[in-house]
């Protein structure tokens, strides 16, 4: 075991690392500047159990109802050897629905990695659908097997990742947060499939950056397909995986002796976490199991108000300091001058708005109108 591997084992308390999957890899891109998360994920720490241990359990996840609904919709779309799915994909890509397309289910346990590799890299460009392929990515020096429910569709000589989701598209619109999550998760599969082809000496660009997203239309279960361009998500994903591959650089920011051993005293665990730099933002609440701990820790800091606020107030870290600058109680440092000017202007606008509101209330009262 290398020195780095030994250090990571000490961080997670000597237990086996928690297995990554496409969801957890996708979530890594949600806050790429957070050293705390990168270190814990690189070490394979069980963050849900860690959050519970320190008294800040995660509050997100799929309901049983959503999982059941998703499984039923997926089975419907894949029925009859994927005939309906093939039609949806072909029509969305603007190509004729091919005759004689093959359907290969790569699920099961026996020789699955080899079967997936052989099927996906075999010569030929005939139309084909591949269900449950086993793919892989390197995350912080460890090989992670991805067992997606997706379908890889090969049409007109190119692969398209097909994601089947049960959230609805209503009047042509879907929940933006769910679409964004589907896009980054699909990017994980696109990258893994490209790496598989590259390892076999084939052109990785045979895997399109356009993902086919299949969802139910409106309030029925009739499926509809749309295209997602995941080039931006691929760039973010590669950058974060490259960062985690340089784990020694990340560990340099971690205090010597830091551990997230789940058998340790909760207060000691929380204290140890405070020593590892974090970068909390409100959107962490939907993606990171430690978000509620980090939010509690960030209370009173401008970072807790979101990235746009933090960036607009660059150089002003404390909310109390923001208020003091806005009220002119204290003079700004040179690097805070621009932010201070914005704060004072905002304070003047707020005061003027309050005066106008008070004047309207007085006018309504004199006119006998209710407030």
Image: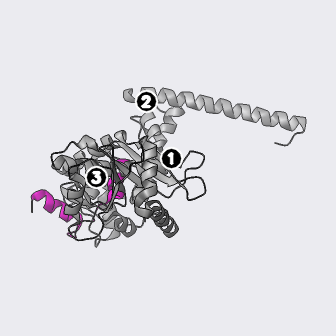
Q: Earlier in the sequence, mark 1 or mark 3?
A: 3
Q: Earlier in the sequence, mark 3 or mark 2?
A: 3
Judge by depth and name the residue closer to the eye, 174 or 242: 174
Mark 1 Cα-neighbour bin, 10 Å: few <14, some 14–19, many ≥20:
few
User: For numbered disc 3, what is the local secondary structure?
Assistant: helix
Is 89 left or right of 145, judged from the image as shown?
Answer: right
Residue matched to label 2: 332
Residue matched to label 1: 176
Is 80 left or right of 209, judged from the image as shown?
Answer: right
Q: Are marks 3 and 2 in contact (CB under 8 Å)?
A: no
Vertical arrangement, residue 332 with respect to residue 133, above or below: above
**Is most of the magenta stretch helix, strand or loop?**
helix
Query: Which quadrant of the rendered structure holds the N terminus?
Result: bottom left
* Residue drawn at the location 71% of the way across and 32% of the way down: 355
Residue matched to label 3: 38
Judge by depth and name the residue closer to the eye, 333 or 268: 268
User: For numbered disc 2, what is the local secondary structure?
Assistant: loop
Residue 208: percent from left, percent from top: 32, 42
- Quick check: can you spot residue 250? no
> Residue pushed farthest bottom?
263
Judge by depth and name the residue closer to the eye, 24 or 213: 213
Vertical arrangement, residue 143 with respect to residue 347, above or below: below
């Amino acid at each position: 075991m290398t020195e780095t591997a030994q250090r990571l084992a000490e961080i997670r308390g000597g237990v086996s690392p928690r297995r990554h999957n496409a969801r957890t890899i996708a979530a890594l891109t949600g806050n790429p500047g957070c050293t705390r998360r990168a270190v814990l994920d690189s070490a394979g720490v069980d963050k849900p159990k860690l959050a519970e241990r320190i008294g800040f359990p995660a509050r997100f996840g799929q309901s049983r109802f959503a999982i059941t609904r998703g499984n039923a919709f997926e089975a419907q779309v894949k029925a009859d050897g994927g005939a309906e799915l093939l039609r949806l994909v072909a029509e969305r890509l603007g190509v004729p629905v091919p005759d004689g397309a093959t359907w290969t289910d790569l699920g099961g346990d026996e020789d699955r990695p080899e079967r997936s590799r052989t099927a996906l890299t075999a010569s030929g460009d005939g139309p084909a659908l591949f269900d449950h392929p086993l793919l892989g990515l390197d995350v912080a020096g460890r090989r992670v097997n991805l067992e997606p429910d997706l379908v890889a569709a090969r049409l007109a000589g190119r692969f398209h990742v097909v994601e089947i989701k049960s959230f609805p598209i209503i009047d042509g619109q879907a929940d933006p947060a769910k679409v964004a999550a589907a896009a980054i998760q699909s990017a994980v599969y696109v990258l893994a499939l490209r790496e598989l082809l590259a390892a076999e000496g084939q052109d990785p660009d045979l895997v399109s950056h356009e993902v086919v997203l299949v969802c139910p239309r409106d309030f029925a279960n009739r499926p509809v397909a749309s295209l997602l361009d995941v080039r931006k998500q691929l760039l973010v994903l590669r950058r974060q995986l490259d960062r985690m591959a340089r784990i020694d650089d990340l560990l340099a920011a971690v205090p010597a002796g830091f551990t997230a051993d789940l058998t340790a005293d909760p207060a000691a665990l929380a204290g140890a976490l405070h020593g590892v730099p974090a970068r909390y933002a409100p959107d962490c609440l939907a993606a990171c199991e430690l978000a509620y701990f980090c939010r509690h820790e960030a209370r009173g800091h401008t970072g807790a108000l979101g990235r746009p606020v933090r960036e607009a107030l660059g150089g002003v870290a404390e909310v109390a300091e923001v208020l003091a600058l806005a009220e002119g109680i204290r003079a700004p440092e040179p690097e805070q001058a621009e932010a201070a000017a914005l704060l004072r202007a905002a304070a003047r606008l707020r005061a003027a708005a309050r005066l106008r509101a008070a004047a309207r209330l007085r006018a309504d009262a004199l006119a006998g109108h209710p407030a």
